[in-house]
């Protein structure tokens, strides 16, 4: 188990020698154009990445999902794609449409819906062994392009602005239990929670309490959220982004008002993917701020949730 991190890195290197799709797309990643903007006083990166159009424009309604073969199921994968077994249920694979220079997809074997509640401990276990990676989760209505098949993703450390910038933000302690503390960040890119814990079980207990407090829409089975986890100095760092919307209005707009940015976990963490060059050229800090404000909680909604959280924990 202790070699999983190195095995994952080697898996990527191997695929770049024999899998043409991965070769082409990882080579293209070296040439992607980027711009640095500022939102709420924090730096964010705009990345022009045409290959991500598959994710940004993915149709995830029930009819569309039923009509296509699931690309995460083993039977539908390319014959030369390999993986690393983890924990008896997960399979660590190379993501052939990368955002990171080292990008993994980690599905379960069975075809089951995207749902985090009973699997949060699994993401902690993955972060524990994939020490050079950040593990992340897109909710079924929060950026997952395969919401019908449970999976995580992982990307190399040092790429997402979140990793360092969250420490600079003003934090409020919501609750502490054992070796775990839940913080609220109000003045970051968008309102969010950060759970810091030196104990896995304490982290699970606190996360489950937070999960239970998040609203679930009548037609859904899980609160809208994006989650990232990594380990640092003997602690698990879990960032939870409560969401209220999948797409901003500009995603559906026509003409010059259209901006094809579909915010998922990577965007929440400060890297905005633009698959269309027109958007990469024209997007402003104000556009990104508007996208965040429409898809994430407002300051007032965050205050209400924090108040509710404190009452619940007390």
Image (tube, rainbow, N blue to C red):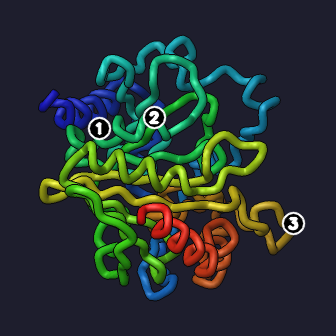
Kind of element beneath mark 3: loop
For the residue pair 235 and 55, the one nearer the viewer reads as 235
Q: Percent x, y for residue 70?
A: 62, 23
Q: Which residue is mark 3?
A: 254
Name the front one of labels 3 and 1: 1
The quarter of the displayed image where residue 173 is located? bottom left
For the residue pair 84 and 166, the one nearer the viewer reads as 166
Q: Which residue is mark 1?
A: 126
Distance (Cα) linking label 3 and label 1: 41 Å
Classify the position of the N terminus by image quarter: top left
Q: Which residue is mark 2?
A: 118
Distance (Cα) linking label 2 and label 3: 40 Å
272 relative position to 30: left or right: right
Farthest residue, direction bottom: 41
- Which residue appears at 57% of the width and 28% of the height? 149
Q: Percent x, y for residue 296?
A: 61, 68
Name the front one of labels 2 and 3: 2
183 above or below 233?
below
Q: Percent x, y for residue 108?
A: 45, 24
């Amino acid at each position: 188990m202790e070699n999983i991190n190195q095995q994952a890195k080697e898996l990527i290197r191997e695929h770049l020698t024999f899998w043409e799709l991965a070769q082409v797309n990882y080579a293209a990643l070296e040439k992607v154009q980027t711009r640095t903007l500022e939102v709420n006083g924090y730096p964010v990166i705009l990345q022009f990445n045409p290959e991500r159009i598959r994710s940004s424009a993915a149709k995830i309604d029930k009819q569309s999902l039923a009509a296509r073969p699931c690309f995460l199921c083993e039977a539908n994968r390319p014959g030369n794609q390999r993986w690393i077994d983890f924990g008896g249920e997960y399979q660590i694979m190379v993501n052939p449409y990368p955002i990171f220079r080292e990008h993994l997809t980690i599905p379960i074997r069975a075809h089951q819906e995207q749902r985090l509640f009973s699997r949060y401990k699994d993401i902690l276990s993955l972060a524990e062994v994939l020490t050079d990676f950040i593990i992340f989760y897109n909710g079924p209505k929060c950026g997952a392009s395969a919401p019908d098949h449970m999976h995580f993703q992982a990307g190399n450390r040092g790429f997402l602005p979140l990793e360092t910038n969250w420490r600079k933000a003003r934090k409020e302690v919501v609750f502490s239990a054992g070796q775990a503390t839940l913080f609220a960040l109000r003045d970051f890119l968008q309102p969010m929670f950060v759970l810091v814990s030196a104990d896995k079980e304490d982290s699970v207990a606190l996360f489950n309490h937070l999960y239970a407090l998040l609203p679930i829409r009548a037609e859904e089975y899980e609160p809208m959220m994006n989650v990232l986890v990594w380990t640092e100095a003997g602690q698990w760092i879990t960032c939870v982004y409560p969401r209220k919307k999948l797409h901003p209005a500009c995603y559906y707009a026509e003409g010059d008002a259209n901006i094809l940015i579909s915010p998922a976990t990577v965007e929440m963490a400060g890297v905005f993917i633009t698959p269309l060059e027109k958007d990469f050229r024209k997007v402003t800090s104000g556009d990104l701020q508007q996208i965040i404000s429409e898809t994430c909680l407002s300051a007032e909604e965050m205050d209400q949730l924090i108040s509710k959280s404190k009452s619940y924990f007390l």
